[in-house]
Image (cartoon, helix red, strand yellow):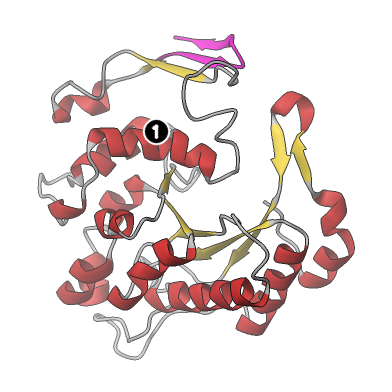
Amino acid sequence: MIREDNKSLESNLAKYRMIDSGGKHLTVRAIKVTLDGALGSRGAWLLEPYADSATSTGLNTVRIEDLKQTARLAIQNDVQLCVHAIGDRANRETLNVYEEAFLAFPDKKDLRWRIEHAQHLNASDIPRFGALGVIPAMQGIHCTSDAPYVPARLGPQRAEEGAYVWQKLMKTGAIISNGTDTPVEDINPIASYHATVSRKLKDGSVFYADQRMSRDEALKSYTWNAAYSGFEENGKGSLSPGKLADITVLSKDILTIPEDEIPTASVKYTIVGGRVMYKQ
């Protein structure tokens, strides 16, 4: 993803765009913008003050007018826009900008614009993801990493209503892409997969169990959904003739072993384009 100011984007965006370069190892077709901070530091931009800091609603780190200009540049140049938005205010503002751009360019279809993280949502904004075709690019491991302080930051009502609401988002038709957000979290996806299906904290408690993904849903979020979120589902994300044969072989079947054993699974092989690139 490209991180540059609008002036530079306007001059260079068409030159930056490339698809399947370097033997299909590099695609550049997206812009990244960071609209707010993180919840732990009370930097996530909220609609209402923090439950544990009544004078703060977090941080807006990019002007909305600037984001609107970025959106226009993205849609005019057939480039994805991917906005880091963690708090409910940041997510609402991003959805508003996306919706405005979509209405202004109704001939542009299948844009697959994303919100990176989409961690804390207002209930009224949850249906907008599916309706607008916006992809919540989320990280299961963030849920269990953040859960110990989420109720303190948001209060129990907001936490239950809109914190890491995977099932609520999927019911709107939204396609959730999963990842690890390295280096914030470890690059190994096994812990994040386990968090996605269990939402289990280190103390054994479960963070709003009704929002857990099934094992099949979680696996798809890490494979086909992730490929779809980058316009790469025709070459990656599932095993079928003609695709790139990017395969991870695990030591255990994470779809069938007891849930608590999932973290003990390890990577035996990684195969990239049909070639074994790593062997345990």
Name the residue rendered at 24%, 81% in the picture. 51
Q: Which residues are magenta?
A: 268-280
Depth check: give the residue in front, 232 or 56: 232
Left or right: where 98 falls relative to 3: left
Q: Is residue 32 magenta?
A: no
Residue 211 seen in this snapshot: yes
Q: Is residue 183 left or right of residue 204?
A: right
Whole-percent x, y for residue 69 in the image: 72, 76
Left or right: 162 with respect to 21?
left
Q: Which residue in the rendered view is the most extreme toward the front? A: 107
Q: Position of residue 94 (x, y in %)?
A: 52, 73
Residue 37 drawn above or below residue 52: above
Question: Can you give x and y, in whole percent of width and height, for residue 19 in the image?
Answer: 75, 39
Placement of the C terminus among the 4 image quadrants: top left
Looking at numbered disc 1 in the image, what kind of residue is underneath it? Pro
Q: On screen, 76 above or below 209?
A: below
Q: Is residue 86 visible?
A: no
Q: Position of residue 179 (x, y in %)?
A: 44, 42
Instruction: Name the quadrant containing residue 38.
Output: bottom left
Residue at 55% over, 17% down: 245
Q: Which residue is mark 1?
A: 189
Determine whether the residue tagged by mark 1 lies in a helix, strand or loop. helix
Residue under the point 22% across and 39% down? 214
Count of numbered marks? 1
Q: Residues within 10 Å of mark 1 (few under 14, many from 20)?
A: many
Quarter residue 235 falls in: top right
Q: Is residue 94 above or below residue 116?
A: below
In the image, 269 versus 10, the foreground residue is 10
Q: Closest to the observer: 134 or 258?
A: 134
Q: Predominant secondary structure in magenta?
A: strand
